[in-house]
Image (cartoon, rainbow, N blue to C red):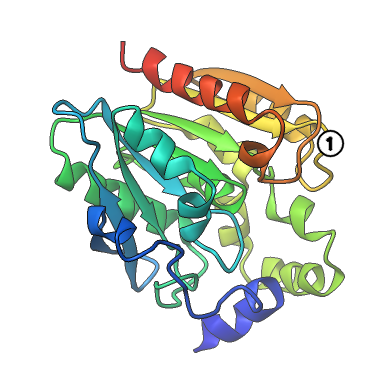
Amino acid sequence: MLYKILKRPFFGRFMVKWRNPLSMEQRKKWSGIQADSKSGVSIKGLFAQTGENMPKATIVLGHPMGKEAKGFFLKNGYTDFLLENGFNVVVFDVNGFGESDCGNFAYYEDILAMGQKAKELCNGIPIGYHGVSLGGQWATIAFTDRSNPFEFAIIESAATTLDEFWIHYPVAYRVLKTLNLLMPRFRKKINMVERIKEAKNMRSILYIYSESDQWTPVSMGKRFMENTPVDAELWTVKNAVHAKIITSKYSDSYKDKVLDFFHKNLD
C-alpha cells in the first residue's frame, strides 16, 4: 500500500484496471504467463508463438507509461509484425500497471523476471528485448545484472535519468527530489545513463529516437550510445510523437530497421 501511495504522483492516472484490446478470436493465440519478481509481486504477461516451425528468437516487449500497459504493443501492431516475421513474443505489465500488482520501484527486476520466464518457455532460442520509453529506460538497469538473459535489445524514446524526465511534471518532480534524498543509494543504482556502462551478456543495442520528441530528445540517445560498452547504434526519425514512431509516417522504415537489427544479431 505504501508504494502505491508513493507512486500516485508519477503513475496514479495510469494504474487502472486493464482492458484487453484483443477480440475473443485474437486472444486464442496468446497464453497467460506470470513470473515472480524481486520487486515483490508476480508479474503478469502474455506469450504467443510464431506460426513458423523454427522461431528465430523470442522478443520481450517492455511497455511505455500509460493505461494500455502491455496492450500498447497489441494495439499498435508490434506483436503481429513480429509474429508474422518468425519471432515468438512476450508482452508483460511492470508492477502497478495492467494486470500486475503494485510492488516497489525496482521495475528493472520485473524486466529481468520476465526475461528469465521467456528463456524458460523457449529453451535454446535467443532472447531479445524491445523497450519503449519507461520499458526502455528501466531495461538499461536490468542489462547490468549478472543474470541478464537478453542478448540484444532496442531501447526507444528512453530518458537518461528520472530527474531529466520528471522535471517536466512539477508535482512529481518535487516528490522525486524528496525520494532522492531519502534513498541516495537507490538513486545512484538507477542512474540509467551511467549504469549502462556496466551492461553484461549482450552483443548490441539499437537506440531509436524522434528528433521532435521534447520529453526524450535525441541528445539522450547519443549519451546512452557513448556510454554503451557493446556494439551500439543510434537511429532517428525527423518528426514523431513520443513513443509513437510505429504509428508515424515513418512506420515502414521503422519496421524495416527493427527487423534488420534483429536479423543481424541472429546471423
Q: Is residue 97 left or right of residue 115?
A: right
Q: Nearer the viewer, residue 145 or 241?
A: 241
Q: Could you say where residue 28 lies in the image, as x and y percent from the top left?
A: 24, 58
| SS category of the residue bearing label 1 | loop
The answer to whether residue 128 of the structure is visible from this angle is no
Q: What residue lies at 60% left-to-right and 86% top-to-bottom?
A: 5
For label 1, the residue is: 212
Q: Nearer the viewer, residue 41 or 79?
A: 79
Q: Is residue 181 above or below residue 4?
A: above
The answer to which image quadrant residue 218 occupies is top right
Q: Could you say where residue 228 lies in the image, as x and y percent from the top left?
A: 56, 25
Q: What residue lies at 63% left-to-right and 62% top-to-bottom?
A: 184
Q: Is residue 59 left or right of residue 74?
A: left
Q: Nearer the viewer, residue 212 or 31?
A: 31
> How many other residues sit within 10 Å of disc 1, few (<14), some (14-19) or many (≥20)?
some
Q: Could you say where residue 169 lies in the image, as x and y percent from the top left?
A: 83, 66
The number of callouts visible is 1
Q: Could you say where residue 25 lies in the image, as x and y percent from the top left?
A: 29, 60
